[in-house]
Each structure stands twice: as C-alpha cells, then as structure tokens.
Image (cartoon, helix red, strand yellow):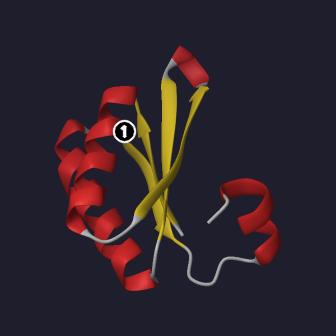
Amino acid sequence: MGFIETVGYASAIVAADYALKAANVRLVRMESVIGVGKSIGVTAYFCGDVAAVQAAIDAAKRAVAPLGTVVAAHVIANVDAEVREKLIDC
C-alpha cells in the first residue's frame, strides 16, 4: 500500500494519473480534508505489489513536485490486516 498527500485536488488528480500510468497499481481511495489555513489536503491511496506501488508513488512525486504541493508520500510493505480492513480496503 502506498499513498501521496497533496495540497489541492488538482495536484492529487495529476499525482494519481501519473501513478496509475507508471505501474500496475489500483487506486483504492482519494480522501479530502480541510487543513490548517483552510487549504484542502487530498490523499490518494494505491494498492499492488510493493515494487509496483513504489514505482507509482515515485512517479506521482516526480509529477507533482514542481508544483510544490506534495505534503507526504510513503509506501508500506505488508500492511497490517486491521489497517487494510478498516482503513484502505486493499
């Protein structure tokens, strides 16, 4: 499982598009929250094998980095069953 969090919905769409084109992963959810300063934080969650998810997240970061909107990005190998069940449905 991997995720990328951006400021703004447009950045998240660009990140998801690049991630999905870069590797054989599945977009399982996009989550929006209103953060500090009323900015919208959007997190895109991806599932697939670890190497594919890493390639997808790397591509997403490269695509969105010039915009300066990446807040966080991470890949978690072997996600705990409870996290998988309750939070991301991978």
Task: Using residue 57 as the reference point, say whether residue 90 is left or right of it.
Answer: right
Q: Is residue 57 above or below residue 18?
A: below
Instruction: Say which quadrant the N terminus sits in.
Output: bottom right
Indicate the amino acid at tag 1: Ala
- The image shows residue 89 at horizontal and vertical percentages of 67, 60
- The image shows residue 83 at horizontal and vertical percentages of 76, 66
Residue appearing at x 19%, y 50% in the figure: 63
The residue lying toward the viewer, choosing from 57 and 28, is 28
Callout 1 crowding tier (Cα within 10 Å): few <14, some 14–19, many ≥20: many
Q: Is residue 8 above or below residue 52?
A: above
The residue lying toward the viewer, choosing from 35 and 20, is 20
* Residue identified by numbered label 1: 12
- The image shows residue 17 at horizontal and vertical percentages of 26, 47
- Numbered label tally: 1
Residue appearing at x 35%, y 64% in the figure: 57
Could you tell me if residue 12 is visible in this image? yes
